[in-house]
Amino acid sequence: LRRWDGILTFLAVCVVVTSISLTLSVDGTLGPLEYFRDRPIQVETLAAAVLWMGQFAGYHVQYVYTFGSLNAISALSSKVSPLTTLCFAAGLLYTYWLQLRGKLDVFTTSLLALLISMITGKIFSPQYLMWVAPFIAYIGKSNWKWLVSWGIVCVLTTSIYPFIYTYAPDALSVPRVPLFYPFVLLRGAIILGIIFALFYQANRTEVVTPPIIPRFSPR
């Protein structure tokens, strides 16, 4: 039952905080959920790269500046957006299941949760990399595979913003720069590769059962 202590504590805190928030303002509590439901897909996300590839199949993409960011709108948006939400939920549930079985430590679990949230979200911003950098440094250390893969992610992100944004004549022209979506797609593919590599490694890890320490009663 001790395995469930953290989950039950987390759920209890969420219920208490959400109940207080609902008591103070129902609209203020539910507003963020409606915001993320209604907002389009931001152009730097992997989902936007999927919409971009849909152009080769005849699905036109329109770029608009709404909700405080540059977004992509396509006939495929209604299919891609729910799919990314499903991948988000499935990825987190699978991660937590592996951690519950003892195949992931808390640091790798936290890293996977952040990476899954980044890659399946409707928004991708360069500062999100700062969330992940401490876990990458702690888990990857000086391993060359981590240095190369995450180094390429950082170089691609810097190339996208600020450099491609700087060279575009205006904001709406940024996604039409030839290298923009190839860089976004490559970055997303590398992050997905890191996620699946961690899943693969976790499934190869043997579950370590802590030893049972006998308890002796004083005479």
Image (spheres, rainbow, N blue to C red):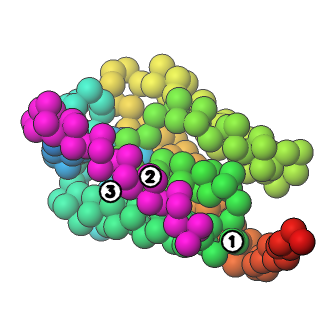
Q: Which residue is mark 1?
A: 102
Can the viewer see residue 174 in this picture? yes
Q: What range is drawn magenta here?
A: 1-29
Name the outermost residue toward the front. 219
Q: Say whether residue 118 is magenta.
A: no
Looking at the figure, which quarter contains the C terminus? bottom right
> What residue is drawn where x is 53% and y is 57%?
6
- Tell me the SS state at disc 1: loop
Kind of element beneath mark 2: helix
Q: Amino acid at mark 3?
A: Leu
Is 174 on the left or on the right of 40, as rendered? Answer: right
Of callouts 2 and 3, the N-terminal one: 2
- Tell me if mark 3 has few (under 14), some (14-19) or many (20+) residues whose alpha carbon lies within 10 angstroms of its own: many
Q: Position of residue 86 (x, y in %)?
A: 34, 67
Say the numbered circle drawn on residue 10.
2
Q: Is residue 102 above or below residue 67?
A: below
Q: Nearer the viewer, mark 2 or mark 1?
A: 2
